Amino acid sequence: MSHLTYENPLISRYASKEMSQIWSAQKKHSTWRRLWVALAESQHEMGLPVTREQVESLRAAVDDIDFEYAAREEKKRRHDVMAHVHTYGERCPDALSIIHLGATSCFVTDNSELIMIRESLEQIRKRLVAVIDQLAKFAAEYRDLPCLGFTHLQPAQPTTVGKRATLWCYDLILDLEEIEYRIEKLRFRGVKGTTGTQATFLQLFKGDHAKVDELDRRVTEKMGFKDRYAVTGQTYSRKVDAQVLSALSGIGQSAHKAGNDVRILQNRKELEEPFEKHQIGSSAMAYKRNPMRSERMCSLARFAISLTANAEDTAATQWMERTLDDSANRRLSLPQSFLAIDAVLILYRNIVDGMVVYPKVIEKHLNEELPFMATEEFLMAGVEAGGDRQDLHERIRVHSQDAGAEVKVNGGQNDLIERLQKDPAFAGCDLASALDARKYIGRAPEQVDAFVAEIVDPVRQRYQADLDQSVEDLKV
């Protein structure tokens, strides 16, 4: 690494080696060569003037790329694909004359990107499943720990720590469904020619349409795809990129929401992301334990979300059969979207794996608000003791406002129970028993159980092999 030039932090700080390698120059240009081999082999099989020796010569040099020679060729020719055609030909001079026969640049650029997109989606799927699994374990562990619920970021009816975690987890389940769909629907551009009409290949096969279609099918299958896009211009539709980046953005949205929740809850000291023994929270405030992982996760997620607009704008502004103003943009937006979400999911799993819960603080906060939430129970207790419902409602309303003022104006404790116990209208009512938080969590524990059994466990079974050989290092 040179310290005199800019280094992309997605590579040097955040994303995994696996994802970085998928988008590496070696991977990209080796894939170009694999495509040229598949094309030449299929042309040989179908009787075009391409020899078996030429195909094997090309195959033997797929990974042997002289990048310095290619750089000199590109500087001279101002064309990256032709630079690599000549670099390949320099390594395999006997096959130079048939490399790229009948093809246009997008035969290698678009098809290789579709291959890298598919591999990247599969990598993202593995990471998603790992986070879902970890969140489900967390949810099951804290399925029945009551905590204060929030709507409008204001105290609301209690829920449980585990039930809240299922909300985070279900967002990722929905993202997984979208990723699975994108993998299923991703197709190969195939052998389509300069404007998608396959005219050059039709010429090579002397007007035999069936052979052109068979060439397209063979190359598609050799590169590991079942289906081709039905029609293309010079490029496959850039809507595909927009759809893929939208799916990645969805993961970013889910992670950002959960990251914000963790940051708020850490502020309340109810839970805490992992904090290492020698970790420094602040260069000035030595006592601080900042949620830096959650903050980083939100930061990278927001970056990935922002890249969706690039793909959408590109899809909207392609002219006719293609225009090259997509190229520089896609060199940035495609890999960086995957790298960012890869990093987000590594962080997410790390956070959940080491999450610390503080039940006593959670109970303290819950008890501070519980008297207000128990007022309906108080009302029913008063009615059962023979009181007038409307009169009791008004008394509770007045006492609640006074107790709220005690907390907010005077900084005191919530004394609603004491106020009600002194009110003759509630004499003989067992108000203390109404303060059991478990009375107010509804079916939260059962919902956690059902969610894990019905939603998460089938995902675990479907991807058990990925879970068994998970590649993430949880030390981030």
Image: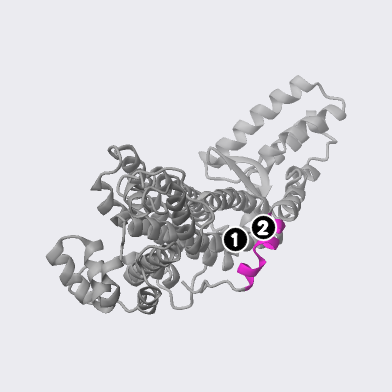
Q: Say which label, 2 or 1, has the lower sequence index.
A: 1
Q: Are marks 2 and 1 in contact (CB under 8 Å)?
A: yes
Residue pointed to by mark 2: 459
- Of residue 202 and residue 254, the one placed in the foreground of this image is 202
Residue 41, position as x, y percentages in the image: 42, 67
User: Disc 2 marks which amino acid?
Assistant: Val
Quadrant, the N terminus: bottom left
Look at the numbered disc 1 and give the secondary structure of its residue: helix
Q: Is 462 above or below relative to 276?
A: above
- Of residue 420 and residue 372, the one placed in the foreground of this image is 372
- Of residue 285 and residue 460, the one placed in the foreground of this image is 460
Q: CA distance from mark 2 to mark 1?
A: 7 Å
Asked whether residue 461 is drawn in magenta, I would say: yes
**Outermost left residue:** 76
Q: Residue at x 35, y 56 (%)?
A: 107
Look at the numbered disc 2 and give the secondary structure of its residue: helix
Q: Residue at x 47, y 49 (%)?
A: 210
Q: Quadrant of residue 420?
A: top right
Q: Which residues are magenta?
A: 456-468
